[in-house]
Image: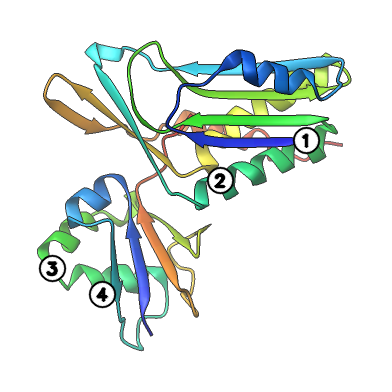
Amino acid sequence: MIHISVQQLPIDIAAEMTRAEAAEAGAVATFTGLVRADDGVGTLELEHYPGATEAALLKVAEGAIERWSLSAAIIVHRVGPMHPGERIVFVAATAAHRGAALEACAYLIDRLKTDAPFWKRETRGVEASWVEARDGDHAAAARWDISKG
Amino acid sequence: MTVRMVYFAWVRERIGTGEESVEPPANVLTVADLVDWLAETSPAHAGAFENRSRLRAAIDQDFVPLDTPIGRAQEIAIFPPVTGG
C-alpha cells in the first residue's frame, strides 16, 4: 500500500498511524519532521512543483517497497505557511520485522529531501530568505545508492 | 516550437513570474542553451540565471541535468536545489 499526500492541512498523526497499522505488518517505523525555530524563524513557507512533487514521492515510496518488501509506505508533506513546532513531514514504513521498517523509514526521508521538488522560505521578522540546500542531505541520500545484496 | 517554462522559489521571484511561454530558436538544443538564450531576453532572466551551478531543471516534470537535450519538451522547469523534508 502506498499513500502519498501533499497538503495544506496539518498532518494528523493518529490518522496516519491508523492507516499504517491497517497494513497488517509486525513493525511500523515512522519519522516526523517539525518546523524548527532556528535563529528566530517566525514562519516557514513551503513551495512545491504540483504534479512533479507527487510523482517524485511516489517513486521514492515504490523504491522503498521494492527494496525492503514493505507492506506499506506513507509520505505526507505539508506545503504553504507554517510555524515553529508544527509538523512539516511524516513518513512511515511497515514491514514484517523492525530491521526492514527502520531502514526503509530512513530511506524514505533521506530520499525525499533530495528527490522531491520542495523549497523552504523562512521569515524572521520582516526578512524572508530561501533556505539553502545542504551537502549533508546529498550524502545522506547517496548512502542508499550502494546496491543491497 | 513553443515551450512552457515554469519557475520556482528564488528563480521565480527574480524572473517575476511563475510561468511563461517561449519560442526558442532552432540552435537551442539543451536546457543549458535555453538558459543562455533566456538570460539574453531580459535583465530579470539574466539575474535569475546568473549562477548556473545553482540551477536545477526538469523536462516534462522529470529531473534532468542541464546538458540534457530539450527534444520535444512541452514543459521545462528551472529552479534552485530542492530543500524539502
Determine the secondary structure under disc 2: helix
Residue A138 seen from this side: no
Q: Are marks 2 and 1 on the same chain?
A: yes
**Callout 4–callout 3 Cβ contact below 8 Å:** no
B32 shown above or below A98: below
Please identify the residue farthest to the bottom as the structure is shown: B26
Q: Position of residue B30 (x, y in %)?
A: 42, 74
- According to the picture, the residue beneath numbered tag 4 turns out to be B37
Q: Answer left or right for A28 relative to A37.
A: right
Circle 4: residue type: Trp
Gap between marks 4 and 2, in whole Å? 30 Å
Q: Nearer the viewer, residue A106 or A94?
A: A94
Left or right of residue A66, residue B51 in this image: left
The tag earlier along the polypeptide, 2 or 1, is: 1
Amino acid type, mark 3: Ser
Q: Residue at x 51, y 52 (%)?
A: A52
Residue B33's disc number:
none
